[in-house]
Amino acid sequence: MAAPPKPHFLMFSAKEIPLLAQKNIQKYREMHDRLVRTVTPSTATARNVILPWAEVENEMDAEMTAINFHDTVAGPDQALKNAVKAAREIVDAASSEWRKRQELYWLLKAVHDLKESLEPETKNWLTEKLNDYKPKADEPGNADPIKQLSSLRQARDKFMSEAFVEGGGLWLTDEELKGVAPETQLSKMSRDERGREPPNIGKTFVRLDIGAHAVYCSAKNPEVRRKVYLANEAKLSHLAQTAKEIIIQQDLHARAWAKPNYAAMEVTRQLAPSLEWAQKFLDQLKKALVTRGRVLLEVLQLRRALDLGLKFQEVQTQKITMWDWYYYRDMIKRELQMDQAKLTPYFPLKHVLPTLLDVMGQLYRLQFDPIAPGSLDARSIWHEDVRVWSVWDKRRNPPTFRGFLYLDLFTRKDKINTTYATRIHPGYDRPDGSRKPLSVAVMCNFSSDETAELRFPDLNALTHELGHALHFLVVQNKFVDGLYFPMDFVEAPSQLLERWLCTKEVLKLLGCHYAHFNAAGLKRWRDKHPGVPIPGRQIPDDVLDKFIASSKFSSLTSNMGSITGSLIDMKMTSLGSHEEVRKLDIQKEWYDIEEEIYGVDTSESRKNGHDYLHSWNVFGGPNNGKGYSHILGRTMASVLFQGGFAADPLNQAAWDKYRVAILEPFGSNRKDYIKMVEGYLGRPFNAKALVDDFTDDTLEVLKKKYTNELRKKGGKGK
């Protein structure tokens, strides 16, 4: 096996970034000038227009991706953030200039009209360039769409730069925190922050960004749950005007491109054939979720009545708020023995990470070779915690080099507090047939403690984001552009892995109780549990069976959240006129949708709450104008999982087929994804797969059980 090249990514300084952007702009401008000077519409072909254009564009897009990556890891370095912002602005300005050059459009159109036999990725590249360079901006009454895009990007950048800043917190007594399990993220990341001065001596400072969810889902005192939930809803209220500015600017941007609204513009680059198709899909799914959600609401009301000692006839008169919805949802999860804390001891981070890489590497036919930190150039990583692997395709003999995987696992001050995968430097084919290797990073916020264990949601998030990273590493793309997957489908491969993770075979393979992991783990068990027998190495079958059997309940509640975000995005981006956009009351629309989906009382939340701002993907992230994409991707994941892996989640032949049929051609098919999936499955696509994921008789069984218990306690049932 050939030795891998050293990681080619190097961190730039704040001074270097604008200069690099200018250098790339100059190369791009010179390429355009050369095309116009040497090619005419009568001589234009794919070879003399597309290939030289794409070669320079690949280099520029890769460089700008690396520059943009700096913004995500800049931490408190404001100079670096400002440099990235400046680079984006000068590139936007240059793009505005280039796309006004009508001679470039006529060259592209000439190639298109020639109707050469082009492979799908090149054909897609040409189609999108035609749309980009078509001289819409010169039509009477239209604004410059590139300048409009710059205004939109500025609003999004402001939102994203502030959305993940620590949003304050509340001082709570130990009495107020009763019910919050010590295994939660709250205890690992907030309980060291004990008050030492009046009036907070002995209290715990609960940071809203990492502790609020644990409190309003678990605290026994309903007033504490209410206080924390409402504070969390209001913590981003200062961004309400910025969010409104985003939807105004994106609507203006769409209309500058002569589109009726922003959603109509975005759908042209998505899996959904049309905006009408997407709306119909959401309406059908909403109907199914509201129907099951109302049964869930009855179950929650009954459980609450049992908890508070109410009589049966009082159940329907008691309204439920969102903080009670979450609390009783989690109570029911525990009663269904879905307590994920029972899984946590089986996932010590130092065991589960290499095991997960080994298992996923085998299924994807990839090999991960760690690169010793001491052999790395100091500028090739942004923090000492970062670890790097070279990644090889094992289907070749000898294995061929695919790129680099970076993992930045641990929480630290000023780090973005979420888990995500991001490209550092895209991969693409060079004109000489060689390949520019890809570099991709997975960013997490786990504890760096030697004994750190992953909660199941953390393991799920890690698996999901590794799925994105490995997908980037196996996809076959000629152009950097081929890595910009439609958001309808980009989540599907990682959501499929979430389904894969919730299988008995996989959880047994990944799990290892910390007492069996190493001598320190064994000592820790004996110190904490003197005289108690050591648990088995693997997760017990009864724990796994109950956890997996209850997954439909989890799927229902998860998809209720997803449809809420999808519907608010569709509402904000599909209005008929710009005047309607400006008049839109986002807060009201959000809570109207929340009441419709969950059936809860939102009257207190409407006073100062801006819960919709937590849907950062809708405002500053990749889901603007296509919020339905996440839940459509989830549907695709259900279809793919049921069609390929439900019977045997570790079947190597099934994974080989999936890699070749779905993952590798992912970037080249664009609008043919549904056909691609149907070809893989051998049958028509059916969205019913997702509905099946959250439909069984669990709620009806619980409703009957709780009703009988209330009657036994003296309530007068029907």
Image (cartoon, helix red, strand yellow):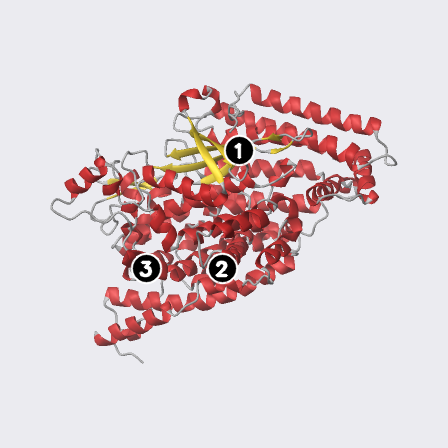
Question: Could you say which quadrant of the image residue 48 lies in?
Answer: top right
Residue 121 as seen in the image, left or right of residue 339:
right
Label 3 sits on residue? 545
Query: Which residue is at a point 31% across and 69% down the rendered structure image?
Result: 302
CA separation in Å, label 3 and label 1: 41 Å
Indicate which label's residue lies in the foreground, 1 or 2.
1
Instruction: Out of 224 and 419, give the one closest to the viewer.
Output: 419
Q: Is residue 596 above or below residue 514?
A: below
Residue wearing tag 1: 398
**Disc with the residue nearer the chain's start (3 vs 1):** 1
Q: Amino acid at mark 3?
A: Asp
Residue 558 position within the rendered picture, expressed as x and y whole percent measured from the top left = 43, 56
Q: Is residue 123 left or right of residue 548?
A: right
Q: Residue at x 82, y 38 (%)?
A: 106
Mark 1 secondary-structure assignment: loop
Q: Is residue 92 left or right of residue 611?
A: right
Category of crowding for the residue at label 3, using alpha-carbon neighbours closer than 10 angstroms: few (below 14), some (14–19), many (at least 20): some
Classify mark 1: residues with Cα within 10 Å, few (<14), some (14-19) or many (20+). few
Residue that carries the numbered disc 2 in the rendered image:
642
Residue 393 point in image, percent of width and height: 52, 37
Check disc 2 and report its element: helix, strand or loop: helix
- From the image, state whether disc 3 or disc 1 is nearer to you: 1
Instruction: Name the amino acid, label 2.
Output: Gln
Residue 134 found in image quarter = top right
User: Residue 251: where, in percent of width, then height?
Assistant: 64, 47
Circles 3, 1 touching at the beta carbon (< 8 Å): no
Decide if residue 29 is on the left or right side of residue 190. right
